[in-house]
Image: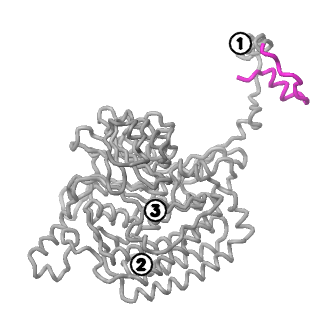
C-alpha cells in the first residue's frame, strides 16, 4: 500500500482494494459493488471533485471486458486519485456516483450512451450524445466504424 | 392530499381560519369518509385544481425549447426551459447535435496523427487540445521534450488562451447587446490568428503541437510579432474596460446573474474561470504545472460573487496574466532543438533519408504504422481557457491508442446551467450561457 496520510483511513476501510501509485496520482482498483462506498469514503477524506468518469472496452484483451474509470481530485490536499473497476460484459451494471458527486450525471450518461454500461441509481440515465432511438453503443470495440461505399471512375462495381 | 374543505376556506374566505382543526376532527372528517370526495369520484362535482401552494395554475407553466438553432446558444446547444411567466423553474440542456465520434476516430489514428483529430474538438483553443494529447502520449512513452519545445508550447497555448478569452468577451458582449465589444474582440483576435498562421500555417486546427515536440520552429521575426501583440492588446483591454467595466447597462445585465457558489462548482465538477469567479484560486498551471510553466511569474485572478460579471472580470484579468507569461517566455526562449532527438518518435530530417538506411527505416515506420507506446494508461490534464482539459489514454502496446478519452471542460461546465438558471429570468439565460463560454465541438466531441 502506498504511503498517503490523506487516504489512510480509506485504505484501512478497504483493504481488499488494490492500491497503487504513479508519479501523478494514487491508483486503486476496486470491486464494482464497493465503488459507491469507496467514492463516498474518498469524498469524506477530502476528494471533493469528481473530475471525470469514463470507461474502456478491453474486448478480447481481458477477462472482464469493461473497465470504468473515475478520476477524483482533492482541492485541499492537491491530489488526484484514479478509481478503476472491472465490469463484466454479461452484466454491465455499476452503482451510480451521482448521489455522491452530482457532477457524475453527465459523464455517466455518456458512458451509458457510448458503452452500454448501466449506472444503478442514476436519476436520468438516457442517451446524451447519440440520438434517443440509436441502436448499439459506438465506443464498444465490436461496433464497427462504418464506411460509405465509393464508386471510382470507370469501375464496374461499387468498392 | 390536502384537505379540500380546508382549502376552500383558504381560497374563498377573506380571513384566515382562526383555529386549525384538531387531530380528532381531521380523523372524523377524513378524506376517505368524505361524501364530497365520493361525489367527486362519481363525477357529480368538479374540483378546481388550483394549487394554492404554488400560487399559479398549471396552464401558466410553459415548456419552451431554446435552440438548437439559436444564435446565442454558441452553436447547437438546446435547452428545455420550464417557465412560469418570465421565471425559469427548471432547465435541461440537451446536447449531442455536434457529436462526430472523435474518440472513436482517435482509436483508428496513430499517435502522430492524433493531434489532427483532437485539435478539432475545442476549436477556439485547438492548441490546448493538441498539448494535452501530446503530454499524455509523452507520459506513455516516458519522453521528455527539450526546453525550447516546452517554451514554444507555453508561448503558443498562452497566446491561444488570449485569443479564446477575446472571443468569450466578444460573444458575451454581443449576446447582451454590446455589439461594439463583438467587433473589438474579433479584431484583436485577428492579430493572434495572423501570428498562428505564420507559425503553423493555419488559423485554426493547427496540428502544431505533436508528441515529441512541435511541428516546426518559430518563424523568423516571431519576436517582433509577439512584441506587437504585447503592445497592442493591453491598450485595447483598457478600451474594453472603458466600454464595459462601469457601464450601468452592462452591470445591470451581469451583476447577480447566473450565480453559482464554490461548493456547487465542486459538486458539479466545474472548473476554469467559472470556478475561479467564485473565489477559489484553483489553476492547474499553478497546482500541477506542465511544460515548465511553473518557472514563469503570474497570478491567478479570482472573483468573489460567482456571477456573470465576475466571470467577465476573471477572463479580462487572465488575458493580462497570459500576456505576462508570453512576455517572459519571449525573453527567456531557450535555444536548441524544438523536438526530441529520439528517432523512434521524431521523423528524421529529409536530408538524412538520402544518407542513412536507419533514417529511411525510421521515416517509413513512423509514417506507416507509427511508433508503439508501451502498454499502460495515463491521464494528463492542463488548464484550458474553459477549465481542466484532460486526456485519458490507454495503450495496448500498439501504434494506435486503444482508448482516447478527452475530459472536455465545456461538457462538464454545462452541468452548471440548471443550477445557475433556476429561479432566474429568461433574458438572463443568454447572459449566463455566454459567460459559461461553451464550445459545442468540445461538448459533443
Secondary structure of residue under mark 2: helix
Q: How far is mark 3 from mark 1, CA to CA?
A: 64 Å
B233 to B91, vertically: above or below: below
* Residue bearing the label numbered 2: B196
In the rendering, which numbered label is found on residue B287?
Answer: 3
- Mark 2 or 3: in front is 3
Q: Nearer the viewer, residue B295 or B34?
A: B295
Q: Nearer the viewer, residue B276 or A126?
A: B276
Residue B324 at x, y percent in the picture: 51, 78
Residue A146 at x, y percent in the picture: 28, 51
Residues in magenta? B1-23
In the rendering, which numbered label is found on residue B70?
Answer: none
Q: Residues within 10 Å of mark 1 (few under 14, many from 20)?
A: few
Residue B72 in sight from this viewpoint = no
- Mark 3 or 1: in front is 3
Q: Quadrant of residue B187?
A: bottom right
Q: Quadrant of residue B215?
A: bottom left
In the rendering, which numbered label is found on residue B32?
Answer: 1
Q: Left or right? Give the position of A70 relative to B80.
A: left
Secondary structure of residue under mark 3: helix
Q: How far is mark 2 from mark 3, CA to CA?
A: 28 Å
Quarter of the image for the N terminus of chain A: give it: top left
Residue B241 at x, y percent in the picture: 66, 75
Residue B233 in sight from this viewpoint = yes
A159 to B51, vertically: above or below: below
Q: Residues within 10 Å of mark 2 (few under 14, many from 20)?
A: many
Residue B331 at x, y percent in the picture: 43, 84
For the point 49% across and 52% down, the residue is: B412
Q: Are marks 2 and 1 in contact (CB under 8 Å)?
A: no
Amino acid at each position: 500500500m502506498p504511503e498517503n496520510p490523506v487516504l489512510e483511513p480509506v485504505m484501512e476501510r478497504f483493504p481488499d482494494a488494490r492500491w497503487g501509485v504513479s508519479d501523478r496520482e494514487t491508483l486503486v482498483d476496486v470491486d464494482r459493488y464497493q465503488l459507491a462506498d469507496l467514492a463516498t469514503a474518498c469524498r469524506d477524506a477530502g476528494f471533493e471533485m469528481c473530475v471525470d468518469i469514463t470507461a474502456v472496452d478491453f474486448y478480447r484483451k481481458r477477462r472482464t471486458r469493461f473497465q470504468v474509470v473515475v478520476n477524483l481530485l482533492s482541492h485541499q490536499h492537491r491530489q488526484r486519485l484514479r478509481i478503476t473497476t472491472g465490469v463484466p460484459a454479461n452484466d454491465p451494471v455499476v452503482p451510480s456516483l451521482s448521489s455522491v458527486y452530482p457532477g457524475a450525471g453527465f459523464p455517466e450518461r455518456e458512458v451509458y450512451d457510448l458503452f452500454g454500461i448501466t449506472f444503478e441509481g442514476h436519476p436520468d440515465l438516457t442517451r446524451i450524445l447519440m440520438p434517443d432511438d440509436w441502436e448499439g453503443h459506438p465506443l464498444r470495440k465490436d461496433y464497427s466504424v462504418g464506411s460509405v461505399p465509393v464508386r471510382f471512375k470507370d469501375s464496374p462495381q461499387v468498392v | 392530499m390536502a384537505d379540500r374543505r380546508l382549502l376552500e376556506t383558504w381560497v374563498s374566505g377573506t380571513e384566515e381560519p382562526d383555529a386549525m382543526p384538531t387531530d380528532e376532527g381531521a380523523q372524523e372528517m377524513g378524506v376517505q369518509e368524505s361524501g364530497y370526495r365520493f361525489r367527486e369520484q362519481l363525477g357529480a362535482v368538479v374540483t378546481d385544481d388550483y394549487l394554492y401552494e404554488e400560487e399559479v395554475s398549471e396552464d401558466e407553466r410553459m415548456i419552451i425549447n431554446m435552440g438548437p438553432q439559436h444564435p446565442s446558444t454558441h452553436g447547437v446547444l438546446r435547452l428545455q426551459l420550464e417557465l412560469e411567466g418570465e421565471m425559469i423553474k427548471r432547465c435541461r440542456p440537451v446536447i449531442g447535435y455536434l457529436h462526430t465520434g472523435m474518440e472513436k476516430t482517435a482509436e483508428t489514428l496513430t499517435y502522430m496523427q492524433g493531434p489532427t483529430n483532437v485539435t478539432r474538438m475545442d476549436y477556439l483553443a485547438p492548441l490546448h487540445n493538441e498539448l494535452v494529447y501530446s503530454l499524455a502520449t509523452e507520459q506513455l512513452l516516458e519522453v521528455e521534450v527539450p526546453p525550447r519545445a516546452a517554451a514554444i508550447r507555453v508561448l503558443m497555448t498562452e497566446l491561444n488562451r488570449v485569443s479564446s478569452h477575446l472571443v468569450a468577451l466578444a460573444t458575451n458582449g454581443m449576446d447582451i447587446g454590446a455589439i461594439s465589444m463583438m467587433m473589438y474582440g474579433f479584431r484583436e483576435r485577428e492579430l493572434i490568428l495572423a501570428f498562428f498562421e505564420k507559425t503553423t500555417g493555419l488559423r485554426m486546427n493547427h496540428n502544431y503541437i505533436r508528441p515529441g515536440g512541435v511541428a516546426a520552429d518559430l518563424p523568423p521575426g516571431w519576436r517582433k510579432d509577439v512584441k506587437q501583440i504585447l503592445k497592442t492588446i493591453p491598450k485595447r483591454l483598457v478600451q474594453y474596460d472603458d466600454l464595459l467595466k462601469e457601464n450601468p447597462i452592462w452591470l445591470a445585465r451581469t451583476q447577480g446573474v447566473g450565480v453559482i457558489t464554490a461548493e456547487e462548482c465542486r459538486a458539479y465538477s466545474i472548473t476554469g474561470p467559472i470556478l475561479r469567479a467564485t473565489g477559489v484560486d484553483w489553476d492547474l498551471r499553478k497546482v500541477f504545472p506542465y511544460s515548465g510553466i511553473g518557472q514563469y511569474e503570474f497570478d491567478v485572478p479570482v472573483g468573489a460573487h460567482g456571477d456573470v460579471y465576475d466571470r467577465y472580470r476573471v477572463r479580462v484579468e487572465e488575458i493580462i496574466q497570459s500576456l505576462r507569461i508570453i512576455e517572459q517566455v519571449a525573453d527567456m526562449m531557450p535555444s536548441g532543438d524544438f523536438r526530441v532527438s529520439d528517432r523512434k518518435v521524431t521523423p528524421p530530417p529529409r536530408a538524412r533519408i538520402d544518407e542513412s538506411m536507419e533514417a529511411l527505416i525510421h521515416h517509413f515506420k513512423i509514417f506507416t504504422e507509427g511508433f508503439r507506446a508501451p502498454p499502460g494508461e495515463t491521464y494528463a490534464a492542463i488548464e484550458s481557457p474553459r477549465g481542466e482539459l484532460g486526456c485519458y489514454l490507454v495503450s495496448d502496446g500498439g501504434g494506435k491508442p486503444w482508448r482516447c478519452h478527452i475530459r472536455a471542460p465545456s461538457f462538464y461546465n454545462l452541468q452548471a446551467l440548471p443550477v445557475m438558471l433556476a429561479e432566474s429570468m429568461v433574458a438572463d439565460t443568454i447572459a449566463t450561457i455566454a459567460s459559461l463560454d461553451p464550445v459545442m465541438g468540445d461538448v459533443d466531441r
